[in-house]
Image: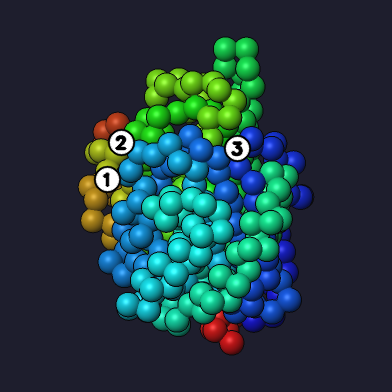
Amino acid sequence: MASLPVSPLAPDCFPDLPVIKGVRFATAAAGVKYQGRTDVMLAVLDPGTAMAGVFTKSATRSANVLDCQIKIGADSDAGAAIIVNSGNSNAFTGRAGDQSVAAICEAVSSVTGLPESRVFTSSTGVIGERLPHDRINAKIDALNNSLDETAIFDAANAITTTDTFSKGSSAQLEIDGKTVSIAGIAKGSGMIAPDMATMLVYIFTDAKIARSDLQGMLSELNEGTFNSITVDSDTSTSDTLLLAATGASDVKVSPDNSAFKTALHSVMLDLSHQVVRDGEGATKFVEVEITSAASDKDARTHALAIANSPLVKTAIAGEDPNWGRIVMAIGKSGAAADRDLLTIRFGDITVAEHGWVSSTYSEEAGADYMKQQDLKITVDLGLGTGTSKVWTCDLTHQYITINADYRS
């Protein structure tokens, strides 16, 4: 596939991420699929690192995901390693996929001295093709010899597929007079739908946190971040979100530390929004908010019905304030709604209310609003106290072009 132009919604540049003591990175060009670019990333974490993770709920999840799910719940004082390849997802590859994961874990363990139970693998790319793991294993010595705590930007580059920009985010805060840092990278552009994490994400902190507490924080914060985005309503077979706490700052963080959770949430939300902003062919970033639903569950159902509707998304792409499609999406969702109680807003513009177009609404105002890159659609259902927010993008001709040509 030819290189894609950078998304018009991309940030100006990759952020300056703080060094996270206790983790080092290296990258290599293994030729898994792509030629002339880095496609493998290795991160090695010091002893005492706690690992947490959430993974795709897909019934056809990859061998890598299944292996990580087995390993992630174990307490250990040993160090850890994360190795990621792009270009091949190692999904729907049967026993060969399991053998590839085992071979990579064995090779990383042999070179780094880490137990295989602490080697976490991820693969992303084409589904249904055997992973040429020998190409990856041939680079592990070189990777281990070039580990660098400042190489997180290179790591972010190496894990991309159809991404048009590398994604990173960070936060720092003071706890007990000491600085605690958080830094994360992500990849994701298409096959993005909320069913856990919907991409590959790796977040690192130098805080000292017990594994069970770390897992609890991650699972809680994931729901309103990575699990609340959608590009195309398709859930990947390979989605993985790993969170590592190295403890190198020697600052102990409890699960009720609201300042740390707020900082971690900000990193997760930023990365999840960057994935949407890099949605394949995207030109608009859209927040959908539902208020006054019968329940939070109903609100989420309505929000996703709007965010995933091809008719809504194509109208947004065409800068058409077609509020009738919002009404359609609410009506089809299956959650409770009353036509005559709906209020629909585009930004601050009241478009419809009381079952009809608002007397103050003008089509010109709606059309002008739709020309913006960042949009907000709000629907008040008038039924209860349920709320939900999800984030999505528009659906353009470029999305079809990218995915019609994905394997060539």
Vertical arrangement, residue 180 with respect to residue 177, above or below: below
Whole-percent x, y for residue 268 in the image: 52, 41
Q: How many marks?
A: 3
Whole-angstrom CA distance, mark 1 to mark 3, is: 43 Å
Quadrant position of the C terminus in the picture: bottom right
Q: Earlier in the sequence, mark 1 or mark 2?
A: 1
Which quarter of the picture shows residue 277?
bottom right
Q: Which mark is residue 386?
A: 2
- Assign a secondary structure to mark 1: helix
Q: Residues within 10 Å of mark 2 (few under 14, many from 20)?
A: some
- Three-letter amino acid code of the residue under disc 1: Asp
Q: Which mark is residue 173?
A: none
Vertical arrangement, residue 250 with respect to residue 235, above or below: above
Single out the residue that lies furthest toward the top: 176
Which quarter of the picture shows residue 144?
bottom right
Which quarter of the picture shows residue 1?
bottom right
User: Residue visible at 76% across and 50% down?
Assistant: 13
* Residue at the disc numbered 3: 22
Q: Nearer the viewer, mark 2 or mark 3?
A: 3
Q: Residues within 10 Å of mark 1 (few under 14, many from 20)?
A: many
Whole-percent x, y for residue 402 in the image: 59, 77
Check contact, mark 1 vs mark 2: CB within 8 A.
yes
- Assign a secondary structure to mark 3: loop
Residue 73 versus residue 238: which sits nearer the camera? 73
Q: Is residue 96 found left or right of 165 in the rendered image?
A: left
